[in-house]
Image (tube, rainbow, N blue to C red):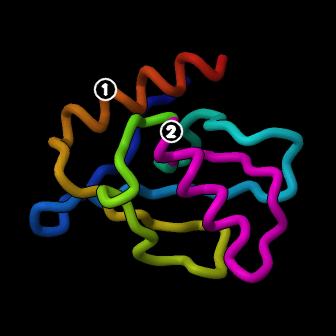
Amino acid sequence: MNLSLNLEMDGTAILLPVRAQPRSSKNAIEGIHDGRLKICVTQVPEKGKANKALLKVIQSALKLKRSQIELYKGETAALKVFRVHEISREELYSRIVAATAQSR
């Protein structure tokens, strides 16, 4: 598995690049592909349903509070960017590594 995830800083926040996979059979982090966290959700991509599901998956898998994460870019695209607050880049990265290891 390639763990080259491109975590950029945006002020004090971290930009987390995500590839969304809506209409999947499960809600889960699938791993890291092309520098993005690949996340599957069962919801369909309409009226923000898949985005809400993505937020929940990221939040629970990475043990974040709801106030720590927001959709920053890609409201209607498969390639999204989330802003994560109040966590160090190293801590976020280690949580991502742990979450992707569990999905195997």
Q: In which quarter of the image is the C terminus?
A: top right
- Residue at 67%, 37% in the rendered image: 28
Residue 40, x across and y down, in percent: 72, 47
CB contact under 8 Å: marks 1 and 2: no
In the rendered image, the residue lying farthest to the left is 11
- Residue at 19%, 44% in the rendered image: 87
Residues shaded magenta: 37-60
Vertical position of residue 51 compared to residue 97: above or below:
below
Residue 23, x across and y down, in percent: 86, 56
| Mark drawn on residue 60 | 2
The amino acid type of the residue labelled 2 equals Ser
Q: Is residue 83 left or right of residue 78?
A: left
Vertical position of residue 76 compared to residue 63: above or below:
below
Q: In which quarter of the image is residue 57?
A: top right
Q: What element carries label 2?
A: helix
Q: In which quarter of the image is the N terminus?
A: top right
- Residue at 50%, 29% in the rendered image: 2
- N-term mark: 1 or 2: 2
The 10 Å Cα crowd at callout 2, few under 14, some 14 to 19, many 20 or more, is few
